[in-house]
Amino acid sequence: MGSESDLPVMQPAAETLRRFGIAHEVRILSAHRTPAAAARFAKGARARGVRVIIAAAGGAAHLAGAMAAHSTLPVIGVPIMTRALRGIDSYLSTLQMPSGVPVATVAINGAKNAAILAAQILAVHDERLARLLAAEKRRMAREVMRGSRK
């Protein structure tokens, strides 16, 4: 994430990854304030065993794009809500990537969905994880139906 203030927004991603048994690390890196460290992280991620990068930032929100520019791993961007433009600035900065540098973008403050998307990407080659995701979808459906019966 781009700054320590993003941690409360990103907590659901860590919790979701933990619930699915997916090893993860949490780092604070800035595309603007620590560009060399951010580039080193992205360039070395695959060698360290990282398979998907989730990058969250607010405002100019270039962290996901910086990760994608320096890595061939899938990158999921989480735009963070801002006071000035209610996160629209973050959303557009994360979404509007140039051709050849894709970033999958979830909703503003959509950390949980970023983690679920990362899990789905990993589940392409992990049957155990695919079964856990299917069970989670069944659980959500039961919850909706339970609410409907009320």
Image (tube, rainbow, N blue to C red):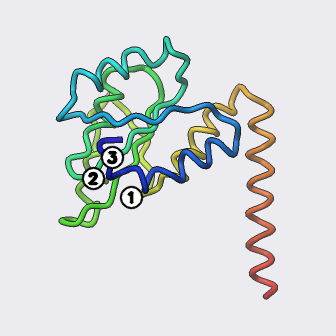
What residue is shown with label 1?
108
Left or right: where 85 falls relative to 81: left
Q: What SS does tag 3 mark?
A: helix
Q: Position of residue 74 (x, y in %)?
A: 47, 29
Q: Position of residue 145 (x, y in %)?
A: 79, 75
In this view, 42 is above or below 88? above
What residue is shown with label 3?
4
Label 3 amino acid?
Glu
Q: Mark 1 and 2 residues: CB-CB less than 8 Å, in contact?
A: yes
Q: Quadrant of residue 146?
A: bottom right
Kindly report which numbered mark, 3 or 2, lies closer to the viewer in this rendering: 3
Q: How many marks?
A: 3
Left or right: where 62 falls relative to 103: left
Q: CA distance from mark 1 to mark 3?
A: 17 Å
10 Å crowding of disc 2: few (<14), some (14-19), many (20+): many
Q: Earlier in the sequence, mark 3 or mark 2?
A: 3
Image quadrant holding the N terminus, namely: top left
Label 1 amino acid?
Ile
Residue occupying image coordinates x 34% and y 55%: 80
Residue occupying image coordinates x 37% and y 44%: 56
Q: Position of residue 40 (x, y in %)?
A: 32, 17
Nearer to us in this view, 119 or 102: 119
10 Å crowding of disc 3: few (<14), some (14-19), many (20+): few
Q: Position of residue 15 (x, y in %)?
A: 60, 49
In this view, 80 is above or below 118? below
Kindly report which numbered mark, 1 or 3, lies closer to the viewer in this rendering: 3
Label 2 amino acid?
Ser
Q: What SS does tag 2 mark?
A: helix
Q: What SS does tag 1 mark?
A: loop
Q: CA distance from mark 3 to mark 2?
A: 16 Å
What residue is shown with label 2?
90
